[in-house]
Image (tube, coloured by chain):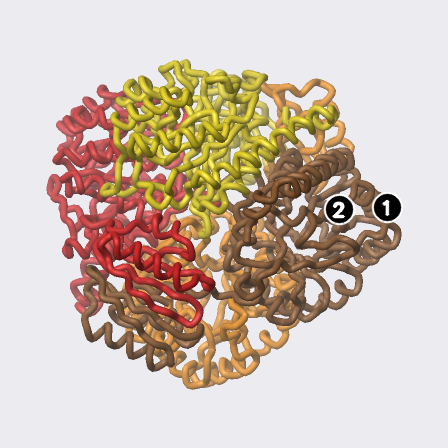
Chain colours: A yellow, B red, C orange, D brown
Amino acid sequence: MVVVMTAEANAKEIERVAAFINKHGAKAHISKGEERTIIGVIGYKHQVRKEHLSTLPGVEKVIPISKPYKLVSREFKKDNTIIPLNGVRIGEEVVIIAGPCSVENEKQLLETAKVVRENGAHLLRGGAFKPRSNPYSFQGLGEKGLKILRRAKEETGLYVVTEVLEAMYVPVVAEYADVLQIGARNMQNYELLKAVGRIKKPILLKRGMSATLNEFLMSAEYIMSEGNNQVILCERGIRTFVEYTRNTLDLNVVPAIKKISHLPILVDPSHGTGRRDLIEPLSMAALAVGADGLIIEVHPRPEEALSDADQTLDPIAFKKLMQKVHHYLSWQQSYLESNVEASEIEYI
Amino acid sequence: MVVVMTAEANAKEIERVAAFINKHGAKAHISKGEERTIIGVIGYKHQVRKEHLSTLPGVEKVIPISKPYKLVSREFKKDNTIIPLNGVRIGEEVVIIAGPCSVENEKQLLETAKVVRENGAHLLRGGAFKPRSNPYSFQGLGEKGLKILRRAKEETGLYVVTEVLEAMYVPVVAEYADVLQIGARNMQNYELLKAVGRIKKPILLKRGMSATLNEFLMSAEYIMSEGNNQVILCERGIRTFVEYTRNTLDLNVVPAIKKISHLPILVDPSHGTGRRDLIEPLSMAALAVGADGLIIEVHPRPEEALSDADQTLDPIAFKKLMQKVHHYLSWQQSYLESNVEASEIEYI
Amino acid sequence: MVVVMTAEANAKEIERVAAFINKHGAKAHISKGEERTIIGVIGYKHQVRKEHLSTLPGVEKVIPISKPYKLVSREFKKDNTIIPLNGVRIGEEVVIIAGPCSVENEKQLLETAKVVRENGAHLLRGGAFKPRSNPYSFQGLGEKGLKILRRAKEETGLYVVTEVLEAMYVPVVAEYADVLQIGARNMQNYELLKAVGRIKKPILLKRGMSATLNEFLMSAEYIMSEGNNQVILCERGIRTFVEYTRNTLDLNVVPAIKKISHLPILVDPSHGTGRRDLIEPLSMAALAVGADGLIIEVHPRPEEALSDADQTLDPIAFKKLMQKVHHYLSWQQSYLESNVEASEIEYI
Amino acid sequence: MVVVMTAEANAKEIERVAAFINKHGAKAHISKGEERTIIGVIGYKHQVRKEHLSTLPGVEKVIPISKPYKLVSREFKKDNTIIPLNGVRIGEEVVIIAGPCSVENEKQLLETAKVVRENGAHLLRGGAFKPRSNPYSFQGLGEKGLKILRRAKEETGLYVVTEVLEAMYVPVVAEYADVLQIGARNMQNYELLKAVGRIKKPILLKRGMSATLNEFLMSAEYIMSEGNNQVILCERGIRTFVEYTRNTLDLNVVPAIKKISHLPILVDPSHGTGRRDLIEPLSMAALAVGADGLIIEVHPRPEEALSDADQTLDPIAFKKLMQKVHHYLSWQQSYLESNVEASEIEYI
């Protein structure tokens, strides 16, 4: 930390701050500048609290230098985290997760699962427990939905991603799901984060709609601090003043996170735009920016979907998207192979 | 709902939309304008889904007209909801809730409780279960903290407000607390909302940091739809681009909510600013804008507080604030009494 | 400035940064911490550039310590700036500025001016040159509008505030206006700021709708750096995700600015809410938070106004507001007089 | 427009709204629903004003249906606007504009211009008049900078893009520049927009940092309404709560605008991220999302640049970026040719 004193701070106040720092076991390093004095705090994290220093007389502000997270950072673990799952190595290869917003019934899910598998996606998504802003809306089929997901897995071989809403449901969801999803609204539900941190399955952690990068990574740190290292991040759009899309997809965050964290990060262009017609271009943009995969909403008949119809692809549009994705990935592969120099300037 | 067709939509597309509406039991009311056709949907809510209409060819957008909430609205219940609690009638009189961010130990809490009571506050707040963005930070004393709160209540007679983080903890927290708080990060934790909707104690619901007015009210609707009508709303600042305060306190929301809802709404200037020196002016502004009360962080020695030291008043500053609050409320009372005309233009 | 090195930065990189700082005439002050090294830059502003330091190898980030503004700051000038104008001392007494959004014709303006004067407002506002987002909307009467403003001044004795849109119009607007307004959309129109910095009349500078506190003050600094010290700031709402008001009125900014600047700051609850029914409560909140005055839109018949009808008071509502304002200000005066201790904890 | 009445509105209020609409020459179309009445307004734009309707008793809100813009819309002009310039057809082919933030001196600009040309960019950018938030920062070389740009054009054949800050400078800038840029801070400087609307050169219009899609298009409409159809839009990042990048690049806006407007839209990843290391990935994403081109800051020695060093590529990084861009564009071309079906699902 660096303590910035006010321009008017006197010698006694400076002295008191230094004494406070030293008393807590850290070292105060005073720099008197032309306009004001700054005091570096040298020591281990948590010896002195930022908020306490800021209460002392003569202190203008306290600037943290150390990062609050540890396990999620590249400084702690240099190599990308790779999560192998049913033949795809997430973090190394682009993974495609697709399926309906909600599991509605067996017919709908099996139909979707076949479309998903035929077009080369790797995992099937589908909500059994749904977090709906309206208490009178369809809330999901619950455990019945989980059973339908299992049937779809048996029929298609696709592994299953589904959301868990609450710590006490973690055991039952973990029984059926291969990957447990933490939704955006629960990104700071710390009891839930701790609960999924204690299981042995990969966790797909969606960014909260107004989460800073630090808050996003700290939520991943919660999961990892309980012993589960298999965390997959997911950007799904943030809330801004913008009115023509449901959210603003923040693709800047993808390379920003790849620089400071070893965790894989996916992009959800369905929620990130809220508009069916924008899913394809933003999917391609997500791959171009370096995302480790996509999560896409697909429904056999969007005009009948029980949720998120506005942002769901039908099978034809999904097929076209996947053709383009595969074509693009081949190009990217050939570009990287042909261009040793270029590959070296990839992040990290 | 109103369906807006594109300028190019042809007669067949318009017909199909009308047929879709009629098929679902509502009535389509077609208005052909100079530039485009719009179709009113007349009927009861949920007969036709907005998202489904928007998937039909020729539809540009669908605009909802009905409000998504019911129980929380003034259209449903015209008079203010009043919650009598230990001698104060919340929703009718200004209520002051004060106390430390976290319960740290018995000495600290009792000391604070006395300051709170002596200065005329009505309820004591204090966190036993703390939602911290950092997994390595102090997480609260848990049930031990609840017991300390009970001791403070026994000693001072102050009723107690404390946060509950998770549906399964509702019974234990409800055993000790007089008012259960749902924090901003849990405003859309629907399992938790449903759980507190099933108890018989007042719920203090804090606005999520990027919650729209509709989302905020829908979360209150969740609680009420389970049978608990004693919901107290609380504005605590929203997340914006602003960097000089922790959050941007949105006082516009107070009269905006009072117009459309009968629920009381408090303001939390501690979280709404994140700065001790701004608590007093924003407290006064909150009362001036019509808030039903304040929730203020107080600690005997902020420079030793285990959380939120930056936004906590010490006893002297709290005393000064309360003097000003009481003086202001007397003026307001005399103004309303002396000025029949003015009192009539108050909201509602 | 403080240069934070990456955890991996080596001795050579640290040395190079220090040499770069010394080469530019400043002094490098190296602090080796447990996790990383930080380097304080000691010297005068502008000797070394933040952006250049950040391009050097091994640098993680560069944190500015000095403030970018000077003339506007309380460190530079301790006492409040007071601008005496037609009997009101802005910065010392609460000033009320009122009038229509646009000057439409002589009758409308004179009618409004009388209402404004009778209710005790100090200045008359009215737009002659209007910045409209729609090129096909009414753009104001131009110089003809200025002449009508002068007529109103002659008839009522009210001084006049009006907006100037462009550097080349400054002379003509200054000929008629007593205070020149810079609108929110022009807060960073630096040519215009420099132009009004060269005249001798007070400038009312509105905050841009996404301006940070630093940007706001830097725009005032532009005006002052050209020699005009009579700058009046005005908060008028910022752009956020909120949808129930046109803007989010940021009252936090008022005491935040009063701490670091000596300039007066007004609040515009008309633009800050965009809703007629919210003007009164937010006006009272603005006074309670310490604003130096209000700027309010008033029109004899809002349902005929050529602009901003949604956020304009009619004469009856304005009268009621002003009664309440005057009543409140008397209370505040008596409170301050009766309470020496309280008055001492006002800002500064 | 659609007028939504309150649930309590009575027959007389409904009648009055209808009469108001009819009086202004439009037709009122009343739909009585189960919960409330809505009234469609049928007629030409501007016959009745939204704000006036909203002042009438019993009106809850007024929802606009028609779009405020005309000339910029695809409804008005179906085919893409194509602007041929020095051999590149903007709007049909991807255009690359590159160069330093500021023109600093002849040597710097010529050096950069050569790098720009050698790597296949089409236009040279460089600021002669600089809008700086700090009045004490380098403000650009002014007309001397324009002359240096002309020299660079003579030497390299590259056409020149440069910013104009103020209406009265339009003639002089237009004498030297091939494309005039309106910066983000001036997007709503309507006098400037009108002034560049009267010249015959292409205008590069940058989105304001908190501009909605409508506001952005309305600013383009200003230029077109004066007779200049050669408008090139540019997304350059919006202001959000995000702290790890200077702005949040909103790539959603690119396909959203392509659907409703015929104007070309570029992306500026330098300002959109503010971080050198993010320029390449976001450039690739911009092309993938369908942008018509890129505008990139390049400087021979960023560590000496007088502005924007943080977001400027050096010649080596620019070369690598351009190699990847060209490789990608070849792939895209081959994909479109090989895949008739895919090309048909492009926007429009």
Which type of secondary structure does the marked residue at label 2 adopt? strand
Residue D303 in view, yes or no = no
Query: Image quadrant of residue A169?
Result: top left
Q: Quadrant of the N terminus of chain B?
A: bottom left
Question: Along the horizontal axis of the image, is B63 left or right of A218?
Answer: left
Indicate left or right for B240 with D137 as reference: left
Q: Which residue lies under the disc numbered 1?
A: D107
Closer to the chain start, of discs 1 and 2, is 2
Q: Amino acid at mark 1?
A: Lys
Three-letter amino acid code of the residue under disc 2: Gly
**Where does the image place residue B322, in percent across and percent down from the top left?**
26, 45
Element type at marker 1?
helix
Q: In front: mark 1 or mark 2?
A: 2
Identify the image quadrant of the C terminus of chain B. bottom left
Mark 1–mark 2 distance (CA, rounded to whole Å): 13 Å
Which residue does the image show at 32% across and 63% down from the upper left?
D61
Q: Are marks 1 and 2 on the same chain?
A: yes
Disc number placed over residue D99 in the picture, else none: 2
Q: Residue at point 46% right, 17% down? A: A86
Chain of residue at mark 1: D
Mark 2 neighbour density, 10 Å: few (under 14) some (14–19) many (20 or more): many
